[in-house]
Structures are given as structure tokens and as C-alpha cells.
């Protein structure tokens, strides 16, 4: 499970241009959208990138269990995402 160090706003309010930090490294949010609606819960994706090297990532979570469902994926090639295991996140 990823440790949430700080939340400047509700995760559902993150949008284009907002900053987040993965293991202390600054990232910038590109967009957030609904991946799948499961009725009482929504599976969400926050797309973001590393400001230094332009690598692209996704933060995935369920809106009803944010802290226990956070997962980070890195884009490999054009369409494949690989799960990463960061220790900390902040926004």
C-alpha cells in the first residue's frame, strides 16, 4: 500500500496542471477521468507525467476506498502500462 504523505485537496479534484509527488519527485497532472462506473463506486484514473523526463504514468483508485486502492502504472512503449510500487505519494 502506498503511504499518503499529504493531501492538498480531495483526490477527485485533481486536474490539469496540479502537482503530485511520487517518492518525493514532482509530477504534473495531465487529466483525470472515469475508467469504469461500478454502480456504488467509481474506478478513476489520474494521468500524470514526470516533469524532468516526460515519462507518463497513471494513478488508479476506487473513489470509495482511496487509501487502500491507490496503484501507480508507468507507460511502456505506446499502450502498455506496468505497475510500479512507490512508497509515498502526495498532492
Image: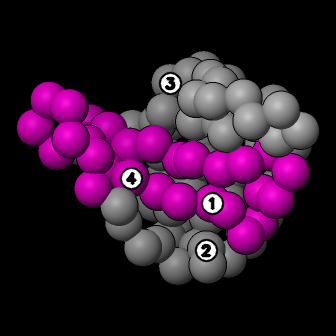
First in sequence: mark 2 or mark 3? Answer: 2
Residue toward you, 69 or 75:
69
> Which mark identifies residue 73?
4
First in sequence: mark 1 or mark 3? Answer: 3
Residue at the (45%, 42%) spot, across then down: 58
How far, Cα to Cα, is label 4 from label 3?
14 Å
Residue toward you, 5 or 38:
38
Q: Callout 1: few (<14), some (14-19), or many (20+) C-alpha neighbours within 10 Å?
A: some
The residue wearing badge 1 is 70
The quarter holding residue 76 reads: top left
Residue at the (73%, 70%) spot, across then down: 68
Please state the horizontal and vertical placement of residue 39, each as a whole percent of the image.
83, 32
Work out which residue is located at the far left of the displayed protein and give it.
77
Magenta segment = 54-82
> Residue 6 vs residue 30: left or right?
right
Work out whether 36 lies above or below 75: above
Work out whether 40 lies above or below 33: below
Cβ atoms under marks 2 and 3 closer than 8 Å: no
The residue wearing badge 2 is 2
Q: Callout 4: few (<14), some (14-19), or many (20+) C-alpha neighbours within 10 Å?
A: some
The residue wearing badge 3 is 30
Please state the horizontal and vertical placement of residue 38, each as a whole percent of the image.
74, 36
| SS at mark 2 in the image | loop
Residue 29 visible to an observer of this rendering? no
| Residue 63 within the magenta-colored segment of the rendering | yes
Cβ atoms under marks 2 and 1 closer than 8 Å: yes
First in sequence: mark 2 or mark 4? Answer: 2
Work out whether 52 lies above or below 18: below
| SS at mark 1 in the image | loop
First in sequence: mark 4 or mark 3? Answer: 3
| SS at mark 4 in the image | strand
Amino acid at each position: 500500500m502506498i503511504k499518503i504523505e499529504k493531501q492538498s485537496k480531495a483526490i477527485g479534484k485533481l486536474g490539469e496542471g496540479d502537482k503530485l509527488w511520487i517518492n518525493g519527485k514532482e509530477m504534473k497532472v495531465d487529466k483525470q477521468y472515469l475508467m469504469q462506473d461500478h454502480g456504488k463506486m467509481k474506478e478513476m484514473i489520474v494521468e500524470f507525467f514526470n516533469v524532468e523526463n516526460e515519462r507518463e504514468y497513471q494513478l488508479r483508485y476506487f473513489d470509495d476506498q482511496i487509501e487502500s486502492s491507490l496503484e501507480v502504472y508507468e507507460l511502456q512503449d505506446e499502450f502498455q502500462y506496468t505497475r510500479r510500487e512507490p512508497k509515498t505519494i502526495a498532492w
